[in-house]
Amino acid sequence: MAYEGASLDANLAAAAGHDPDLVRELRAAFIESAEHHIDLLTRARCDGNWQVAAMRLKGLAASFHADSLLVLAEEAVETVPGNPGVLRRLRQILDDLAIES
């Protein structure tokens, strides 16, 4: 997972003009947004809410080239609401990214 964090940091640095303070702010905002979407997935009780949250998470991951998060978000789009395996792995990826910050 260290590669994922390094890739994310490289994309954030490119967006921030290599300003370390701005990179930290963008990383924190990325993680906060991903946490929000995963929380929405956790609380989704219908296909529509699940799909919207999964697609938003997918868009966020794609925007920052967070490839493993993108793959899992795509899996979430294709699975049933509340899939415990997907939710567990999404939380793990997010935990790993948060630790690397």
Image (spheres, rainbow, N blue to C red):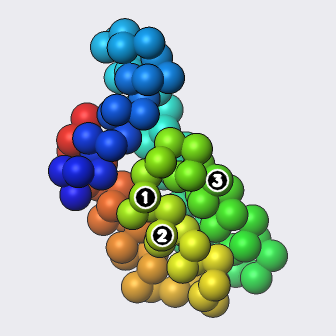
Query: Can I make out residue 47 in this image?
Result: yes
What distance separates the C-alpha of mark 1 from that of mark 2?
A: 6 Å
**Residue corresponding to mark 2:** 71
**Residue corresponding to mark 1:** 67
Q: Nearer the viewer, residue 13 or 22?
A: 13
**Quadrant hosting residue 56:** bottom right
Mark closer to the chain start, 3 or 2? 3
Q: Quadrant of the N terminus?
A: bottom left
**Residue corresponding to mark 3:** 59
> In this rendering, is residue 31 above or below 86?
above
Mark closer to the chain start, 3 or 1? 3
Mark 2 surroundings: few (<14), some (14-19) or many (≥20) residues within 10 A: some
Residue 34 percent location from the top left of the image: 51, 50
| Residue at image location 31% in from the left, 14% down from the top | 20
Q: Are marks 1 and 2 in contact (CB under 8 Å)?
A: yes
| Residue at image location 58% in from the left, 44% down from the top | 63
What distance separates the C-alpha of mark 3 from that of mark 1?
A: 11 Å
* Element assignment for label 3: helix
Relative horizontal placement of residue 50, taking residue 66 as reference (left or right): right
Mark 3 surroundings: few (<14), some (14-19) or many (≥20) residues within 10 A: some
What distance separates the C-alpha of mark 3 from that of mark 2?
A: 11 Å
Q: Residue furthest right?
A: 48
Residue 25 percent location from the top left of the image: 42, 21
Amino acid type, label 3:
Gly
Amino acid type, label 1:
Asp
Q: Nearer the viewer, residue 83 or 67?
A: 67
Q: Quadrant of the C terminus?
A: top left
Amino acid type, label 2:
Val
